[in-house]
Image (cartoon, rainbow, N blue to C red):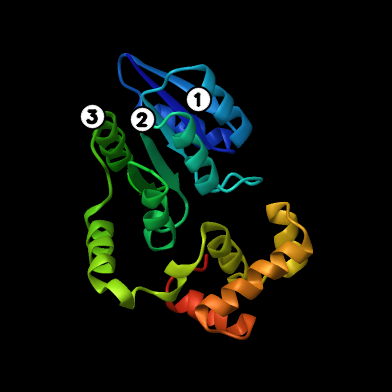
Amino acid sequence: MKRILIVDDHEVVRAGVMRIVEQPGMVFGEASNALQALKLVRDEDWDLAVLDISLGERSGLELLKELKQTRSKLPVLVLSMHSEEQYARRAFQAGAAGYITKDSSGEELIKAVNKVLEGGRYVNSATAERLALDLEKGIDRPRHFALSDREFEVMRLIATGRTVGEIAGLLELSDKTVSTYRARILEKMGMKTNAEIIHYAIRNNLAD
């Protein structure tokens, strides 16, 4: 029997994932937020967690790190609306065993789930090639690689045109904290204005 925990803040997505990947002998659990996910992982044994990277009130990357701290051997497959260019590298660095986007086919999702359940790692061939190229580039890595996960998240929200106050509300932070993150982003990336951030994000396919 394989026990799979689905972590996503949309009920219809959780139901869809279960319907697509269900096989004889599989048992599913559901969590709609980070607190539920952490409790279920602490209290029960799971063979796999399928995790959305955008959980509304909490960054999926932060939750991924906490899940791995709680159960270091728990394989986590990230299922995200965000493209591989935006989050795949960070997800793997945080401990993910696989990364797949929500616009993937049902067949690919099944393949990813089975691969991770078998102890492997999953990433599609195009993403694997990009990650390999990133490693080869060494010091020539894109500037946003220097950002922390939270800084990267704030940068992407700035790139969508949101104000400091709007970002603070979305991330449940103070305006002052968001302004501090913005200052760090500008410094690390050698920029001076939000317009430069927006242009960079669009050019590097980082803005939704």
Residue name at image x 30 percent, y 15 percent:
24
The quarter of the displayed image where residue 85 is located: bottom left
Residue 60 image point, x, y percent: 53, 45
Kindly report the distance in space between the C-alpha atoms of the residues bearing marks 2 and 3.
13 Å
The answer, for residue 33, to whether it is visible in the render is no
Kindly report the distance in space between the C-alpha atoms of the residues bearing marks 1 and 2.
11 Å
The residue labelled by disc 1 is: 41
Residue name at image x 38 percent, y 44 percent:
95
The answer, for residue 49, to whether it is visible in the render is yes
In the image, which is nearer the foreground, mark 2 or mark 3?
A: 2
Residue 88 image point, x, y percent: 38, 55
The reply to whether callout 2 and callout 3 are in contact (CB within 8 Å) is no
Name the mark on residue 99: none
The residue labelled by disc 3 is: 118
Given the image, on which type of amino acid does mark 2 rest? Lys
The residue labelled by disc 2 is: 73
Kindly report the distance in space between the C-alpha atoms of the residues bearing marks 1 and 3.
19 Å
Disc 1: CA contacts within 10 A as few (<14), some (14-19) or many (>=20): some
